[in-house]
Amino acid sequence: MTVLSHLGRAVRSESAKLSWRNSLWYAVVPLAVLIPVSLNFGIAKATESNTINGGGGMYTNNAAYWILVFSTFILMSGGVSSMCAEFKNNTIETAFVIQPRRWMLPVAKLIVFGVIAAVTALMTTFVILWGFPNLFPSIWGRVDAFSADGIRLLFGVPVFTVLICALGLGLSALVPKPGLVVMIILLWKFGIEVFATFIPGDLGLFVQRLSPFKNGELGAGQLSTIKSLFGGQNGSLLYFAVLCLIVFVAGTVRLSVSDMKGS
């Protein structure tokens, strides 16, 4: 059998584990959709009733904010939980006996969970970009799913989500503890990158412009407080992709190295 055939079997094996009882279907995916939709709906209703100041309404390049803040990390948790459970339940050894090519396990998980995450992120982004302008034309009327900014988000948000899944899976292979993996990623995103905004002067601005998640969000098409050091949105997205894939490859290599040491 070819490598692609083995990888196809590994992907089918991962897909078969996702029965209807898996938390991915009744918790992860629904929450990834409902949280940004509910937040946007609540804010729009409050703005419409003059409960809060809407600040002139919504623009396309800021419409995916809640998806990037919540949905991406929620969807990442599905892959993280799956990878860490292999270690916790000792099923990883069985998997490696069936398929000695250890690198296929994280790659197969990335394909399966990445596709699910990308489709969920795309659908959620489209629902918000297309649906909310029709529900709240006075507030979301300037948002256009098929404008240049809208198409950028429809493409960029799923890619950004898949990259975060790769980051989570890589860390899970290195440190197979789901709580710790999620904590590390969220601490970087909402701790270190926020702390960088308090560094004064040009140094602070430079550090912010190196922030991985800020660059990733900029690359996805979201309005950002930084200017790209990497030639624009595509360069920033590529910078974020390289960092995520380095972690993913490191985790995959760690599994392969452990295999060689154990043999």
Image (cartoon, rainbow, N blue to C red):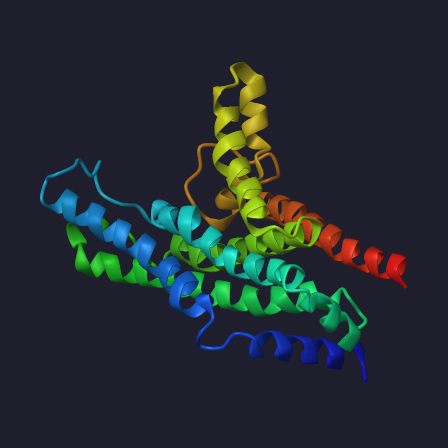
Q: Residue 60 location, x and y as percent?
A: 34, 49
Residue lying at the far front in this picture: please name it.
89
| Quarter of the image where the N terminus is located | bottom right
Q: Residue at the far left: name it.
A: 49
Q: Which residue sits furthest bottom?
A: 1
> What residue is rendered at 48% in x and 20% in y?
198
Q: Quadrant of the C terminus?
A: bottom right
Numbered circles on residues, count: 0
Residue 79 relative to residue 67: left or right = right
- Picture quadrant where residue 224 is located: top left
Asked if residue 61 can be seen in this view, the reply is no
Residue nearer the viewer, 5 or 134? 5
- The residue depicted at 36 percent of the width and 48 percent of the height is 66
Residue at screen point 53% across, 14% down: 201
The percent coordinates of residue 239 (x first, y second) are 63, 44
Q: Quadrant of residue 209?
A: top right
Q: Nearer the viewer, residue 96 or 1?
A: 96
Q: Is residue 5 above or below residue 65?
A: below
- Decide if residue 129 is on the left or right side of residue 94: left
Q: Residue at x 67, y 60 (%)?
A: 87
Regarding residue 72, the answer to whether it shows in the image is yes
Residue 50: % across, % down: 10, 40
Residue 194 x %, y %: 48, 29
- Direction from residue 29 to residue 108 in the image, left or right: right
Vertical order, 16 against 67 (above or below): below
